[in-house]
C-alpha cells in the first residue's frame, strides 16, 4: 500500500480522482484475493496505512467508496478492521460477561473514547442498510424524511447481509473498553463497564422495562449503526446515557430515556407502541445537562405526550440542544415542563432550534413555566416558523382508593402506567405503582410500596426521593415498607419500623431509627445500620454475617445455611435444616431448629439451644479463659460437646480425662463436671497449679459423661 501512494499528495488526489479510483480498485482486488486465500488473515495487507488513508483525505474525497467496494463479507470484515486497526491490532481478547450460561462473545479490548468513536463512526458509512417495516401511516413521513436527508430506515441500523452471532438471554457487559459488533441479542443488554462500544448490534426485546440499560457509572458508552426492536412489549428502547449514532429504534413505548450527558444524532425512532400507558416519548429527559439531540427523525403516531420531552422531574436542566431534527406527532410534539422539584432550569441554555415540527394532536409545543430559546423551527403542517402556544394541560391520572381492610392496589387487571394516585386508607395495604410518577398514600396501618415487577429502583423513604424503574417520580405518604425488584435495588427506610425486601438482586438496604427488618435472599445483599438506631433483624434465606449495629438474625427457607453474629448481643435462629450458628463477642442467644445444628457462642456469656436433631456445642481451649461461661438449655444424649484442643489427642474423650465432682484428683483429669451445679469445667493440667475454668452450665440438669465429648 505504501508503494502505491508514496508520491501521491492531497492535491493529486483531488485533481485526479479517476486514476486514484483505478489504483484503489486494483489494490482492493488483490487484497481481497489474499484475504480470501488466507482465511481472512491480513497477510500482505497493511491495515494501519490503509486506515490512515481512509480516515484522511481519501475518505473525505470518496465518501461513497466503501459502499461500492466493500460488498462481500470478507472485504467488509477488513473494513471493520481498518476502522479500528490502530486500537485493536495488538489488543487482548476479552470475554464479555453474561448472566446466562450461553457462551460469551469474544471481542477485543481497546481504549475507546466518545470522541474517537464518533470520528470513526462519521467516517465509516455502512454499505447497504437493512430495511425496516413501516406502518401505512409512516409511509409519507418516511418518504419525506428520505427526500429531505433526514434519518429513516434506509440510512440507519445494520448493514444488509451482515453476519450476526446470536445470543438469547440477559447480556451483561462488565469489561471496560469492550468493542462488540455483529451481535443479535434476543433479551436485554445491560452495560456495567466504562467506555463500551456496541455497533452493528440488533436487540429484539420483549422485556417489561428497558431493552438496553446503561448503568449510572458506565461512562463513555457508544451505540451506533444498530437496531432495537421492542417486539411490542418493551417500555424503553434505551435507558441511560452516552453517544447514540444512526440507530433504528421501533416498537417501544419510549425511544431513549436520557439520564446523563449524551450525544443523540442521526437516529430514526418510530412506530412507537401504544398501551395502557398515557405517556410516550421519542426522547425523554427528566433532568440532565450537556445533552445534544441533533438531526434525528422521531415519529410518534400516538396522540399522547411528545417526540421530545424535557422536564425537571429528577434533576435540573441545563446545556440541552435540540437542533435540526424532524419531529412528528404526540399530544404536543415538543413538551417542556419546569413545574417539578427535581432542580432548577437554566432557560437560556435550553435551545430548540432549526427543527421541522408537526403532527401534534394538540399542537407543536407545550411549555410550562420555562422560557427556552426557540428559533428557526418550521411547522410541517403550515410551513411558517413555529412559535409556542399556550398548552392545554393533560388530564390528571386515575385515583385508586382502597377500603378500611388490607388492600392491594391497583386491583387485579388494572395496569395503568400514568401518573396515578393510590390511597390505601386503613389496613395494611400493598401499593404497586406503574411506570408513571405515582403518589402512594398508605393511610393508616403498616403499608408497603412494591416494585416487584419493575426494573431496578432507588427509593429513599426518609427523603422521599425515588428513581429508576417504576419508582421514577413516585411520591410516598405513610409508607413503612419497601419491596424491590429482581434487579439491584437501593432501598432506604425512615424513622418508622421498616421492612426492606430488596428482591432477587444484589441490593443495598439501609434502615433508619426504627426497629427495622431486612429480607436478605442474595449473598450480594448489603445491610447498613446506624448505631443506636433501634433493634434490627435480618431474615436471610442465604448464609449471612450480621453487619455492625444489627442485633438479630433469623435463617429462613429450607436450605442448609449458616448464620454468624457481630459484636452486639445477637439472637441467631436457625431454620429446619442443618445450620452452623456462631455468635460474636457479645452475649448471644443461639437457637437451632429441627436439623443437626452446630452452635458456637464464641466470646461472651452465651445461651445455646440446640432444638431437635443431633446437635453439637462447640468450645475452644484457646478461648475458655476469656470467653465467659455459656448456658446450654436442652442437651440430650444424642448431642455432643465438641472441644477444640490446642494440642494432644483428638477423637473420643478418654474416661480417665473426665471426672465427676468439683476438682481434679490427678494429672489426667481435664474435664470436671459438678453434678449438683450441672457445671462443666476445664482444667489444663489436672491437679496441677493451673485453676479450672467454667465452660458451661447445663440448665436442664443433664448428667454428663465422657461419651458426650468429641475432641478435635
Image (cartoon, rainbow, N blue to C red):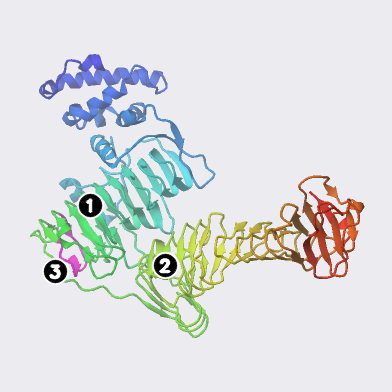
Residue 293's disc number: 1
Q: Is residue 370 magenta?
A: yes
Crowd around label 3: few <14 · some 14–19 · many ≥20 (10 Å): few
Mark 3 secondary-structure assignment? loop
- Range of magenta residues: 355-372
Q: Is residue 211 left or right of residue 502?
A: left
Please identify the quadrant where the N terminus is shown. top left
Q: CA distance from mark 2 to mark 3?
A: 38 Å
Q: Nearer the viewer, residue 497 or 30?
A: 497
| Residue hosting label 2 | 460
In the image, residue 209 lies at what x, y percent?
41, 58
User: Outermost residue, front direction?
Assistant: 689
**Count of picture labels:** 3
Q: Nearer the viewer, residue 353 or 229?
A: 353
| Residue hosting label 3 | 389
In the image, residue 264 lies at what x, y percent?
26, 49
Q: Is residue 62 left or right of residue 159?
A: left
Amino acid at each position: 500500500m505504501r508503494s502505491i501512494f508514496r508520491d501521491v499528495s492531497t492535491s493529486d488526489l483531488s485533481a485526479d480522482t479517476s486514476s486514484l479510483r483505478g489504483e484503489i480498485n486494483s489494490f482492493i482486488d488483490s487484497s481481497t484475493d489474499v484475504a480470501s486465500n488466507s482465511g481472512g488473515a491480513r497477510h500482505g495487507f497493511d491495515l494501519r496505512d490503509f486506515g490512515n488513508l481512509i480516515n484522511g483525505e481519501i475518505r473525505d474525497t470518496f465518501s461513497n467508496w466503501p459502499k461500492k467496494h466493500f460488498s462481500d463479507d470478507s472485504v467488509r470484515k477488513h473494513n471493520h478492521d481498518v476502522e479500528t486497526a490502530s486500537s485493536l491490532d495488538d489488543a487482548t481478547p476479552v470475554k464479555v460477561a453474561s448472566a446466562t450460561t450461553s457462551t460469551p462473545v469474544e471481542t477485543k479490548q481497546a481504549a475507546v473514547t466518545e470522541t474517537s468513536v464518533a470520528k470513526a463512526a462519521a467516517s465509516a458509512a455502512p454499505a447497504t442498510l437493512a430495511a425496516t417495516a413501516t406502518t401505512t401511516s409512516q409511509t409519507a413521513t418516511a418518504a419525506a424524511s428520505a427526500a429531505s436527508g433526514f434519518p429513516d430506515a434506509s440510512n440507519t441500523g445494520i448493514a444488509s447481509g451482515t453476519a450476526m452471532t446470536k445470543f438469547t438471554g440477559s447480556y451483561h457487559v462488565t469489561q471496560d473498553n469492550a468493542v462488540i459488533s455483529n451481535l443479535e441479542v434476543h433479551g436485554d443488554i445491560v452495560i456495567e463497564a466504562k467506555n463500551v462500544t456496541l455497533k452493528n448490534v440488533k436487540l429484539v426485546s420483549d422485556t417489561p422495562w428497558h431493552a438496553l440499560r446503561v448503568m449510572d457509572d458506565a461512562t463513555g458508552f457508544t451505540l451506533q449503526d444498530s437496531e432495537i426492536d421492542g417486539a411490542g412489549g418493551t417500555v424503553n428502547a434505551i435507558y441511560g446515557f452516552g453517544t447514540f449514532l444512526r440507530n433504528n429504534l421501533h416498537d417501544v413505548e419510549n425511544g431513549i430515556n436520557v439520564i446523563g450527558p449524551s450525544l443523540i444524532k442521526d437516529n430514526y425512532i418510530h412506530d412507537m407502541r401504544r398501551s395502557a400507558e398515557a405517556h410516550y416519548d421519542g426522547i425523554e429527559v427528566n433532568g440532565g445537562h450537556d445533552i445534544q439531540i441533533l438531526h434525528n427523525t422521531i415519529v410518534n403516531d400516538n396522540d399522547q405526550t411528545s417526540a421530545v420531552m424535557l422536564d425537571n422531574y429528577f434533576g435540573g436542566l441545563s446545556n440541552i440542544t435540540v437542533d435540526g431534527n424532524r419531529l412528528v406527532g404526540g399530544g404536543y410534539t415538543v413538551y417542556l415542563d419546569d413545574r417539578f422539584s427535581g432542580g432548577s432550569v437554566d432557560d437560556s441554555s435550553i435551545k430548540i432550534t432549526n427543527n421541522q415540527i408537526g403532527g401534534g394532536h394538540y399542537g407543536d409545543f407545550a411549555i410550562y413555566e420555562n422560557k427556552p430559546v426557540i428559533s428557526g423551527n418550521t411547522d410541517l403542517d403550515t410551513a411558517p416558523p413555529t412559535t409556542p402556544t399556550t398548552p392545554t394541560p393533560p388530564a390528571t391520572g386515575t385515583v385508586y382508593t382502597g377500603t378500611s381492610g388490607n388492600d392491594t392496589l391497583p386491583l387485579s387487571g388494572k395496569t395503568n402506567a400514568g401518573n396515578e394516585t393510590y390511597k390505601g386508607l386503613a389496613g395494611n395495604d400493598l401499593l404497586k405503582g406503574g411506570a408513571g410518577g405515582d403518589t402512594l398514600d398508605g393511610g393508616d396501618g403498616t403499608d408497603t410500596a412494591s416494585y416487584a415487577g419493575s426494573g431496578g429502583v432507588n427509593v429513599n423513604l426518609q427523603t422521599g426521593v425515588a428513581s429508576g424503574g417504576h419508582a421514577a417520580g413516585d411520591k410516598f405518604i405513610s409508607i413503612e415498607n419497601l419491596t424491590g425488584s429482581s434487579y439491584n435495588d437501593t432501598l432506604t427506610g425512615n424513622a418508622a419500623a421498616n421492612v426492606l425486601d430488596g428482591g432477587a438482586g444484589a441490593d443495598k438496604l439501609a434502615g433508619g431509627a426504627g426497629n427495622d427488618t431486612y429480607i436478605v435472599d442474595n449473598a450480594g445483599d448489603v445491610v447498613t445500620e446506624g448505631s443506636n438506631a433501634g433493634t434490627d433483624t435480618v431474615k436471610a434465606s442465604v448464609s449471612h454475617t450480621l453487619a455492625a449495629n444489627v442485633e438479630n438474625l433469623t435463617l429462613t427457607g429450607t436450605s442448609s445455611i449458616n448464620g454468624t453474629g457481630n459484636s452486639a448481643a445477637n439472637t441467631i435462629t436457625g431454620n429446619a435444616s442443618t445450620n452452623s450458628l456462631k455468635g460474636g463477642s457479645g452475649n448471644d442467644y443461639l437457637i437451632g431448629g429441627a436439623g443437626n445444628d452446630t452452635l458456637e457462642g464464641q466470646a461472651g456469656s452465651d445461651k445455646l439451644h440446640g432444638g431437635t436433631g443431633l446437635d453439637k456445642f462447640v468450645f475452644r481451649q484457646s478461648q475458655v479463659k476469656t470467653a465467659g461461661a455459656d448456658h446450654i438449655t436442652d442437651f440430650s444424649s444424642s448431642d455432643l460437646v465438641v472441644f477444640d484442643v490446642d494440642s494432644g489427642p483428638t477423637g473420643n474423650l478418654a474416661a480417665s480425662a473426665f471426672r465427676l465432682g468439683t476438682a481434679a484428683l490427678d494429672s489426667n483429669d481435664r474435664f470436671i463436671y459438678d453434678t449438683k451445679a450441672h457445671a462443666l469445667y476445664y482444667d489444663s493440667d489436672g491437679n496441677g497449679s493451673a485453676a479450672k475454668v467454667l465452660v458451661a452450665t447445663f440448665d436442664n440438669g443433664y448428667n454428663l459423661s465422657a461419651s458426650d465429648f468429641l475432641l478435635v
